[in-house]
Amino acid sequence: MDKNTRVLVQGITGREGSFHTKLMKSYGTKIVAGTSPGKGGSSVNEVPVYDTVKEAMKEHEIDASIIFVPASNAADAIIEAADSEIKLIVVITEHIPVVETLRAIKYAKSNSSTVIGPNSPGLIAPAETMLGIMPSMAFSKGKIGIISRSGTLTYEVAEIVKSVGQSLVVGIGGDPIIGTSILEMAKMMDDDPSTEEIIVIGEIGGTMEERLASSISKGEVKKKVIAYMAGMTAPREKRMGHAGAVVYMGMGTFESKINAFKRAGVKVAKTPYEIKSLL
């Protein structure tokens, strides 16, 4: 993903889609088209609007799509993008039914598309391009990769390490089912020559952090990883903000994730502000 990435906005005529199209364009993101059923032929912020993704693909070369479609239709929007062989699909929408999310992500993967989200703030390559709803002033170009399950903590940590700068920042989403895991993203950054170190912002729930730690122990992720875990005081079986941030049957606890990282030799920050000193 760089300044040449050509982007489609699905749901561009909605309030959120229109607002963030304007912000992404002002950041330099190359938005070439948008879609909204029944609104074909119009334009939003000087971006041409089409009824379907296939109609947009006939007129433009498109590398990535960002989805602002309401939850009731968002899964179909993912499938529509994957059907048109768009390789990167960023899903901002939250509250998509879990079964629908599973269906759409399975279809996208079978079409070799990478899905970021749902319930993601998006991703940004500072000074290059942004596909998301992030506050761009928190980021600067550098060599640190950030992978996060929390939108707000993403911005906070980016601001803390702003003087060092970031190569790529990705909010993978806070839902229990997401398209790209922490481990998958860490391996991508491990292979990325513009990234020197990786910051992981995890939280309670699921086992993504433990799987990353296991992979680091096996030498499958070689670059230095620094972790911060949210949810130290979270009670069990009570959802904490994100749908995926909940501990059931003792799995995915704060302690299990911290211990897994420590066994893998990963430095774990006690607070977001400690991260910079661990780089």
Image (cartoon, rainbow, N blue to C red):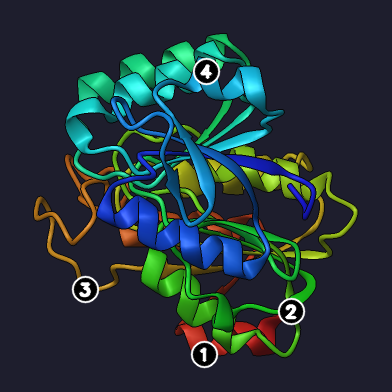
Which residue, given by chain and number where applicable, does mark 3 sit on?
Answer: 233
Task: Examine the rendering and report whether any part of residue 169 can be seen.
Answer: no
**SS of the residue at dot 3?**
loop
Percent position (x, y) of residue 244? 27, 46
Which residue, given by chain and number where applicable, does mark 1 sit on?
Answer: 273
Callout 1 amino acid? Tyr
Q: Nearer the viewer, mark 4 or mark 3?
A: 4
Quarter occupied by residue 202: bottom left
Label whose residue precedes the other's in the sequence (1 or 2): 2
Label whose residue precedes the other's in the sequence (4 or 3): 4
Callout 4 amino acid? Glu
The residue positioned 59% from the left and 61% from the top of the image is 25
Percent position (x, y) of residue 122? 49, 53
Q: CA distance from mark 4 to mark 2?
A: 39 Å
The front one of 141 and 64 is: 64
Percent position (x, y) of residue 146? 62, 63
Label whose residue precedes the other's in the sequence (4 or 1): 4
Badge 2 crowding class, 10 Å Cα cut-off, few under 14, some 14 to 19, many 20 or more, is some
**SS of the residue at dot 2?**
loop
Q: CA distance from mark 3 to mark 1?
A: 18 Å
Q: CA distance from mark 1 to mark 2?
A: 15 Å
Task: Examine the rendering and report whether any part of residue 131 can be seen.
Answer: yes
Residue 165, label in figure: 2
Q: Are marks 4 and 2 in contact (CB under 8 Å)?
A: no
Compared with 74, 258 (above or below) is below
The front one of 201 and 114 is: 114
Percent position (x, y) of residue 271? 45, 84
Which residue, given by chain and number where applicable, does mark 4 sit on?
Answer: 55
Q: Nearer the viewer, mark 4 or mark 1?
A: 4
Q: CA distance from mark 4 to mark 1?
A: 47 Å
